[in-house]
Image (tube, rainbow, N blue to C red):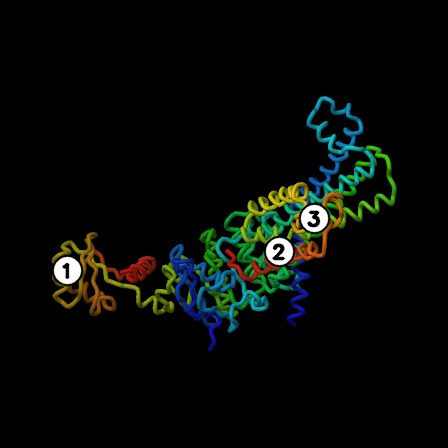
Amino acid sequence: MIRRFKMEGFYTALNIEFLKARKSKMFWITIIFFVFISVMMGFLLLVAKHPEIAKNSEIISTKASFIGKTDWPSYFGLLIQFGMALAFVGAGIVTVWVFGREYSDRTIKDILAVPVSRFSIVTAKFLIAFVWSFLLLVIMFFVSVLSGFLVNLEGWSAKLFTHSFVLFTKTSLLTLILLTPVAFITCMSRGYLLPFGFIILTMIVTQFVIIGLKFISPYFPWAIPALITSVAGPSNPQANVLSWIILWATALLGFAGTAAWWRYADQH
Amino acid sequence: MEAVIRTESISKHYGKLKAVDNVSINVQKGEIYGFLGLNGAGKTTTIRMLLGLIRATAGASYLNGKKVNPGNPLMWENVGYLVEVPYSYPDLTIKENLEIIRRLRFLSDEKSVDRIIEKMQLGQYTDVIAKNLSLGNAQRLGLAKALIHNPDILILDEPANGLDPAGIVEIRELLKDLAVNKGVTIFISSHILGEISKFATRIGIIHEGMLLKESSADELENIRKKCLLVKTNNISEAKEIIEKNGYSANLPENGILEVTGKDALSEPEKISLLLVQSGFAPSLLKVEEEDLETFFLRVINDQEV
């Protein structure tokens, strides 16, 4: 009986979270935002390839110059790096919204004293945030690839595409699992401000660690995905066993902390 | 008989602030328990503890004999509730909001959403998104969420908020019907005694976190102050005559004599006769019961004194 409720409870919670996400404006706003970024990548590629297009706009020219070489290998490299940053910021926003809306809409009390366990609801929320974020990143990858085709980049090969997509997926997934502490901070602060601050600060510190404090990078959770996938570059140390332990421990602690917060903390 | 809703010396302290202090309540099956208190008295905090939304600093709560435990979702199967102002997902329609609750309650009958919409008279707003609802209709939606699964226990925090007078009467009748005909146990908080006393079978008054008084509706009727109001053309003389005949009389500034004691309330015609025979025929003779709100404030003030 209890087991039936547990399974049904999780399925129900997942179903409800999916309905809430699908019906929200946020879902479509994030898709549009990620498509827009991918189209802008294509535009910057075009400018990088034909600098005369933006000769009057220094801002655009400067941004386009970051792209460097305009061929598929360089473009895929950029996409993977970009994907990692966006996985944390974009997916961070999704995570904050999935958990934070219950507090900002003040609907949390409606889902706490029901036959579905709080653990099921938290797990369903994580799963929805994870799948939603991954979907956004995949959309970004494919729209960016389409942009690359439209700009007519050189050096395409199916092998390069497959390799890049696998690397992109691996980096994205490893970054996404590190969003669990963001959910915990959202629930603890019952709002959006603190977790957004955490996301920005973590992103800055991660860049700082990867560039300036390389010896720490195997032990700083949010720098580890870049080391595992070698996206951080050859000058950075390799991820070791401890790095993997730290990565998973951070993800699990974030998850357990969120579940415990829902279960034990006073919910006002 | 075991109480359906029970709190056992329940307390909630925030540092030095005693939001709820040592409150013990027993509500039997089919009772409507009116939980009365001013704003900030501890009503909502007690309700939150009953629902496992916050943890008690001391004591425990029980629903249907089971200790309230946030880790046991099965205990909420037959409990419906509404806490403070009801909020719903703003971008979802009434129907979608109720659909979420239907699923969370494991109700297989999809028609249950339509039925509760009809019952709460929300039919014309079915497809209106929650953020566009009036306060009254948002309240109705909150009540619909509490009632959709025909619970055995209803815990309602100020359910009349935002409802118009007709809506208040409608909800009152609905709750009375649920308690009397379906045996639903109802715990309802309010800061308006006049409203609660119209249908509660028992009333508890909470003030500054403490349960000051508990009485049945009948007892409440008896403990409210009553007096005979008398007005004549010479009120001072009339007072003397009345007092000489063994009654107690009080003359406040409004010039209307308040007579109590002996059989003043049961046989006011005796006082009328007495005054007529003394040449002070009364122009007003009326038995007056203490106003419910005055009673409520008197209980609170007595406690503070």
Q: Nearer the viewer, mark 1 or mark 2?
A: 2
- Which amino acid lies under the numbered mark 3 shown in the image of this protein? Ser
Say which residue label 1 marks.
B239
In the rendered structure, which disc, 3 or 2, sits on the residue that comes first in sequence?
A: 3
Can you give x and y, in whole percent of width and height, for residue B147 in the image? 55, 61
In the depicted structure, whether residue B266 falls above or below residue A71: below
Label 2: how many residues lie within 10 Å, few (<14), some (14-19) or many (20+)? many
User: In this figure, what is the number of numbered marks?
Assistant: 3
Disc 3 to disc 2, how far (Cα)?
A: 17 Å
Front-most of residues A228 and B224: A228
Tell me the subunit letter for badge 2: A
Amino acid beneath label 1? Lys
Q: Is residue B260 visible?
A: yes
Is label 2 in a helix, a strand or a loop? helix
Note whether residue B127 is visible: no
SS category of the residue bearing label 1: helix
* In the image: residue A244, left or right of residue B135: right
* Residue B123 drawn at (x, y percent): 59, 53
**Labels 3, 2: one chain:** yes
From the image, tell me which residue sits under label 3: A133
Q: Chain of mark 3?
A: A
